[in-house]
Image (cartoon, rainbow, N blue to C red):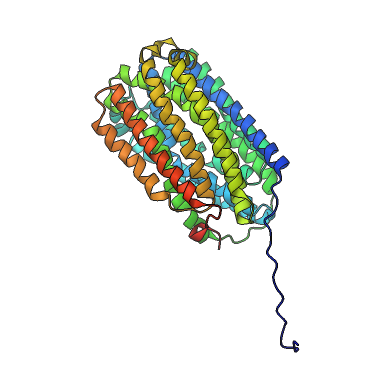
């Protein structure tokens, strides 16, 4: 019998994980997929129109600058993931979300300014390396950098708070403004500078709208201390992951612009643009998967089942799209970038396999990252380094270049799939989790 100072031990019943709210998840997933589809259609129309309005060598300048922009703005993608993850975890605390928003926005603004100034300072080097006609395209990219860090923070907050409708609208609006402004400026005679000017105006408009949407949700309240060290420990590996993913899929365009003649670089730009359509689907589903898995994993939910469904869906869609590219490569090139690229249609099936592999890699990494699994980090970091070194050696022809890309992507997919399979039903959070 227990005394006043003793408490009789009672058996503790196991707590079952909360059930999956399938209707809510499917609704949110549908909104993200539809919104991302709209964004991807607008992005497709940007490539569709600009590739036809510009000569191949001018279009290769646009694609090279956009690839450089993606690589340089990797920290912005990391900030978006941090915002999505911790807003999802702290969704019940308006004070914590508000503090998170202010803290990340300040970091984003500082990074944007520093990188914009750095790119301007190095504009001479990049102009020579990428064989650009002048430094104006790089100055426009520097302007984009000022907007491309703040916008992702607020879009990440919308993701994490599961306001997928506002997230989709904010994302699509950026590409709508980009399309309209770019087409107008190119038609006015600004050529590649007009296309990049449209990117600048789109980034500014999208950032303002995302800020407006997220400000309404976060509210205004007193700040509260947040676990900066825990966030930094999770964010640093995440930054490395984003660097690796971006380099893996975009450095080929930069290397092609450097190694090939203007005509061949333009041809490769058309191939890459057409093949990159294949990972738009994975991008949409990853945007939905990451915050959902982060919240469910933290609170004991069945995140593994959600990931199986997502990976299976992406793989199925990619197989269908690759088969379409295999059957009708000339039609696909003609549809997306125009008839002037049909001469290199024989290489499209191979590069399509590479980009389809990347699409599945993207979803697998999103799940592993959301659950705190670290086993994939070193192999993923090695992949873009190997890709860059191999492309530096094997670039005697477009075919050799594309087959090198294939080999690296398929090898990386095999490793990521194996790690995902080994991760099992109980992924660990380890040091990436909140303290």
* Vertical side of 135 occupied by 164: above or below: below
- Residue 318 as seen in the image, left or right of residue 219: left
- Residue 389 as seen in the image, left or right of residue 211: left
**Quarter residue 193 falls in:** top left
* Residue 277: percent from left, percent from top: 49, 26
* Vertical side of 250 occupied by 1: above or below: below
- Residue at 69 percent of width and 47 percent of height: 20
Q: Is residue 69 visible?
A: yes
* Vertical side of 83 occupied by 271: above or below: above
Query: In which quadrant will I find the N terminus?
Result: bottom right
**Quarter residue 306 falls in:** top right
* Residue 58: percent from left, percent from top: 38, 18
* Residue 426: percent from left, percent from top: 55, 55
- Residue 178 as seen in the image, left or right of residue 15: left
Q: How many labels sit on residues?
A: 0
Farthest residue in the top direction? 339
- Residue 142 as seen in the image, left or right of residue 371: left
- Residue at 44 percent of width and 35 percent of height: 70
Who is closer to the viewer here, 289 or 43? 289
- Residue at 68 percent of width and 38 percent of height: 26
Query: In which quadrant will I find the C terminus?
Result: bottom right
- Residue at 36 percent of width and 12 percent of height: 343
* Residue 391: percent from left, percent from top: 29, 32
Who is closer to the viewer here, 101 or 164? 164
Q: Is residue 142 visible?
A: no
Who is closer to the viewer here, 256 or 348? 348
């Amino acid at each position: 019998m227990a005394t006043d100072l003793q408490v009789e031990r009672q058996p503790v019943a196991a707590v079952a994980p909360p059930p999956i709210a399938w209707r809510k998840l499917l609704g949110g997933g549908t909104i993200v997929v539809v919104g991302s589809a709209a964004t991807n259609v607008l992005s497709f129309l940007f490539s569709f129109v600009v590739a036809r309005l510009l000569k191949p060598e001018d279009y290769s300048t646009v694609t090279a600058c956009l690839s450089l922009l993606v690589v340089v703005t990797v920290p912005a993608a990391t900030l978006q993931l941090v915002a999505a993850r911790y807003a999802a975890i702290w969704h019940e605390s308006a004070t914590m979300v508000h503090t998170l928003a202010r803290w990340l926005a300040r970091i984003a603004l500082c990074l944007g300014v520093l990188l914009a100034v750095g790119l301007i300072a190095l504009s001479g080097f990049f102009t020579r390396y990428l064989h650009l006609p002048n430094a104006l395209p790089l100055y426009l990219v520097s302007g984009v950098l000022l907007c491309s860090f703040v916008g992702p923070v607020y879009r990440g907050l919308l993701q994490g708070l599961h306001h997928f409708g506002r997230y989709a609208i904010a994302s699509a609006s950026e590409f709508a403004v980009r399309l309209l402004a770019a087409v107008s400026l190119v038609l006015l005679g600004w050529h590649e500078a007009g296309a990049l000017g449209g990117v600048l105006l789109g980034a500014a408009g999208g950032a303002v709208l995302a800020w407006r949407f997220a400000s309404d949700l976060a509210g205004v309240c007193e700040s509260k201390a947040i676990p900066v060290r825990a966030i930094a420990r999770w964010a640093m590996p995440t930054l490395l992951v984003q660097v690796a993913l971006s380099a893996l899929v975009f450095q080929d365009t930069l290397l092609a612009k450097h190694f090939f003649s203007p005509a061949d670089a333009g041809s490769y730009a058309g191939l890459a643009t057409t093949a990159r359509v294949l990972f738009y689907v994975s991008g949409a589903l990853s945007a939905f998967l990451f915050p959902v898995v982060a919240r469910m994993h933290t609170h004991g939910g069945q995140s593994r089942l959600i990931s199986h469904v997502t990976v299976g869906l992406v793989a199925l869609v990619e197989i269908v799209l690759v088969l379409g590219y295999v059957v009708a490569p000339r039609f696909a090139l003609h549809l997306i970038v125009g008839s002037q690229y049909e001469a290199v249609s024989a290489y499209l099936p191979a590069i399509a396999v590479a980009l389809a592999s990347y699409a599945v890699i993207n979803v697998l990494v999103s799940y592993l990252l959301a659950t705190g699994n670290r086993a994939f980090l070193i192999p993923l970091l090695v992949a873009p380094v190997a890709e860059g070194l191999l492309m530096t050696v094997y670039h005697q022809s477009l075919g050799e270049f594309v087959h090198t890309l294939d080999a690296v992507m398929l090898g990386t997919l095999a490793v990521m799939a194996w790690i995902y399979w080994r991760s099992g039903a109980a992924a660990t959070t380890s040091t990436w989790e909140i303290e």
